[in-house]
Image: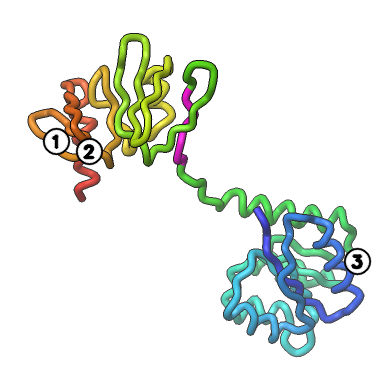
């Protein structure tokens, strides 16, 4: 992922060096640079960034005061020439504390910590498709297009809104790959796409013009899923 960041540094040489480090890492996107905390605070009131490189000694309104008084949601890497602020910095739960002059290697270590944070908090995107083995190729099947899967001897026939695909993949494999809330087993020979069901009557499911039976073995699980969708 791209990590957007800003630099708040009042020493021109230090700011230039830090900018150079940021530009060496293609996954860092430098959005803005400020030489004082007030301008940075005004910016952060209307813009959000992932990471803030923050000098501590910035005149009357220091980097520490910025963190103590403002609701900063970005990850923060403190930069300073004074080691005595280290404990205070970690009290404020910053990602890292870089003591000037720091090397590129030490800078990368700090970025690794930031990346680790985003990796842990990143919400995985739900799966939207599977690839199915058919003949001599892999066919992409979108969950949104699936209607039902029908057992045909050793084969499974996948019915979608636009096509039918035959495969040797088993129902068990489909159950492992597709969440039951999306495509549910209802019979030893059928799985159905929950959102494509037109009606349910007398333990039969209607999808378009096809009637699909619900067997005793799968009835309870199926109706539990249906009841959840009704709430």
Name the spot of residue 215 as percent of width and height, x first.
Answer: 17, 21
Within-10-Å neighbours for mark 2: few <14, some 14–19, many 20+: some
Image marks 1 and 2: residues in contact by CB distance under 8 Å = yes
Query: Looking at the image, is 31 positioned above or below residue 187?
Result: below
Q: Residue at x 91, y 75 (%)?
A: 13
The residue carrying mark 3 is 101
Give the spatial CA distance, label 3 vs label 1.
70 Å
> Picture quarter containing residue 200?
top left
Image marks 3 and 1: residues in contact by CB distance under 8 Å = no
Within-10-Å neighbours for mark 1: few <14, some 14–19, many 20+: some
Q: How was the colour assigned to the protein in this rendering? A: rainbow
Q: Residue at x 76, y 57 (%)?
A: 110
Side of 68 where 128 appears, left or right? left
Numbered disc 2: secondary structure:
loop
Name the spot of residue 226 as percent of width and height, x first.
Answer: 21, 40
Give the spatial CA distance, label 3 vs label 2.
65 Å
The residue carrying mark 2 is 197
Side of 208 where 157 appears, left or right? right
Pick whichever of labels 3 and 2 is earlier in the sequence: 3
| Magenta stretch, residue numbers | 127-132
Side of 97 where 173 appears, left or right? left
């Amino acid at each position: 992922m791209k990590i957007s960041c800003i630099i708040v540094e009042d020493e021109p040489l230090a700011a230039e060096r830090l900018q150079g480090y940021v530009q060496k890492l293609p996954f860092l996107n430098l959005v803005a640079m400020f030489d004082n905390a007030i301008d940075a605070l005004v910016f952060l009131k209307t813009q959000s960034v992932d990471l803030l490189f923050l000098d501590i000694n910035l005149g009357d309104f220091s980097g520490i005061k910025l963190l103590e008084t403002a609701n900063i949601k970005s990850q923060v890497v403190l930069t300073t020439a004074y080691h005595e602020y280290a404990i205070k910095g970690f009290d404020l739960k910053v990602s890292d504390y870089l003591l000037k002059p720091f090397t590129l290697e030490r800078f990368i270590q700090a970025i690794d910590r930031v990346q680790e944070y985003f990796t842990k908090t990143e919400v995985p995107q739900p799966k939207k498709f599977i690839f199915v083995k058919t003949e001599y190729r892999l066919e992409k099947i979108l969950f949104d297009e699936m209607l039902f899967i029908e057992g045909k001897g050793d084969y499974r026939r996948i019915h979608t809104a636009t096509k039918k695909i035959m495969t040797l993949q088993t129902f068990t494999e489909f159950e492992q790959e597709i969440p039951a809330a999306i495509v549910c087993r209802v019979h030893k020979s059928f799985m159905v796409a929950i959102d494509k069901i037109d009606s349910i009557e007398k333990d039969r499911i209607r999808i378009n013009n096809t009637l699909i039976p619900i067997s005793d073995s799968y009835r309870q699980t199926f109706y539990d899923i249906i009841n959840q969708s009704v709430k």
